Image (cartoon, rainbow, N blue to C red):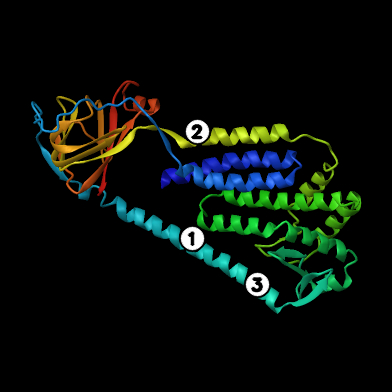
Amino acid sequence: MIEYIIEFVIVSLLSYLGCRLLINYCLNHKINRFWLLFCLCFSVLIPLIHIKIATDSTIGAINLDQVVNGANVEGLVSDVSKTDSGIRPLYLLILALYLVVVLVLLFRFYFNIKILLNKKNNAESVNYKGTAIYLLDETIKPFTFLNFIFMSKVDWTNHKNKDELINHELYHKNFKHSHDILFIELLKAVFWFNPVLYAYKLLILSNHEYEVDKAIISGGFDPKSYTHILIDYTFKPKTKNYNLSSGFSLSLIKNRIHMISKFKQNTSSFKHYLAMSSLIVLLFLSSAFTLDTSGYFLAEKIAYSQKEHKLYLQGDRIEVNFQGNDISGRGSFSFLGKVDYLEIDNQTIERDITINVAGKKCLINQIVDQEVLSGLGLDDQAKAFQVKTVAE
């Protein structure tokens, strides 16, 4: 779980930085919108995908009925059920805390939707060129939620640019921008620990406004007059905003005005989209492909011989699934060859030891990172292994 969180945050951060450059320099906001949503899904899913590349196998020929010869195994017999007794309650506490926060945020998500739907049901509805406009007794800027456009009664009655304001919201409605907002809000509720998602939402809202602004300017509206309307209305004081809505935003006004000035520029976006595609491919290759250095084994006991530097499996039911090898049988044997370093349940093994692992699944991982090996005082050719026992 920790590995997923770290990888998710890193991948989402890198994809966000790529999308931010894309939004600022590419004027095809429909394609930008696709990239934003794709990168969000990519960031969530790619840490779950692991394509393993096989390493050189350390397992040689094994005679499952061979009795261990010369393995002077003696000393300690441990009950591995005690190993993780202190770790498991902490893990359950963290998991419970995570789920509590998720439930609270999902409830808030549902509550916000219900508030807007209740406002729609209780509001006065007027017809504007075949579209229902819901009038509220609140000082609000016009906003859209799903297929519903909301506006204050004061603006409906008195605002000199009422048509332009409603037209702006009609584009939000027709482009179905609320679906993107609901999607990112749902992700924020489930993955609340990732701060990058909050930055992603601002980027999505920015692209929504750029897409609407460009549609209005392309429809023949004078850019200078439209800019004046934006400035005049965006800075309207004491207005209420709703979290799940699309509408005028004070925080985006400067970027929107800058983007409007670029709409008539004839710039090619091909190289930017090519760069973004390359970034996604690189993230996929770096995240999805991993060395096949892990596996598991089942046995009744495991015994380490300091003299021989070997790990032996013992029992009537032995299974090994490691580095492409799938072996089962009974007896007592060593399957790793010479072991230069061994760690079992976070404890470095430096003497003869026998551990009872009946009813446990032993997860094994070969350490191949050169920096980690160097930190252990080993060269890059050394064979070092970590074993973690868990309930079967």
Q: Is residue 289 left or right of residue 270?
A: left
Name the quadrant containing residue 178. Answer: bottom right
Residue 121, placed above or below residue 197: below
Residue position for label 3:
117
Depth check, front residue: 39 or 131: 131
Q: Position of residue 244 (x, y in %)?
A: 65, 62
- The mark lying in front, picked from 1 and 3, is 3
Residue 173, placed above or below residue 320: below
Q: What type is the residue that disc 1 sits on?
A: Val
Residue at the spot 88% in from the left edge and 63% down from the top edge: 161
Q: Is residue 90 left or right of residue 139?
A: left
- Report helix, strand or loop for mark 2: helix
Q: Position of residue 362 (x, y in %)?
A: 25, 42
Q: Position of residue 205 (x, y in %)?
A: 69, 53
Q: Earlier in the sequence, mark 1 or mark 3?
A: 1
Q: Earlier in the sequence, mark 2 or mark 1?
A: 1
Residue position for label 1:
102
Q: What type is the residue that disc 3 sits on?
A: Leu
Residue position for label 2:
286
Residue 96, can we see it? Answer: yes
Name the quadrant containing residue 13. Answer: top right
Q: Earlier in the sequence, mark 2 or mark 3?
A: 3
Residue at the spot 79% in from the left edge and 64% down from the top edge: 237
Depth check, front residue: 336 or 379: 336
> Could you tell me how far apart the alpha carbons at marks 2 and 1 are, in whole angstroms?
30 Å
> Could you tell me how far apart the alpha carbons at marks 1 and 3 are, in whole angstroms?
23 Å
Q: What type is the residue that disc 2 sits on?
A: Ser
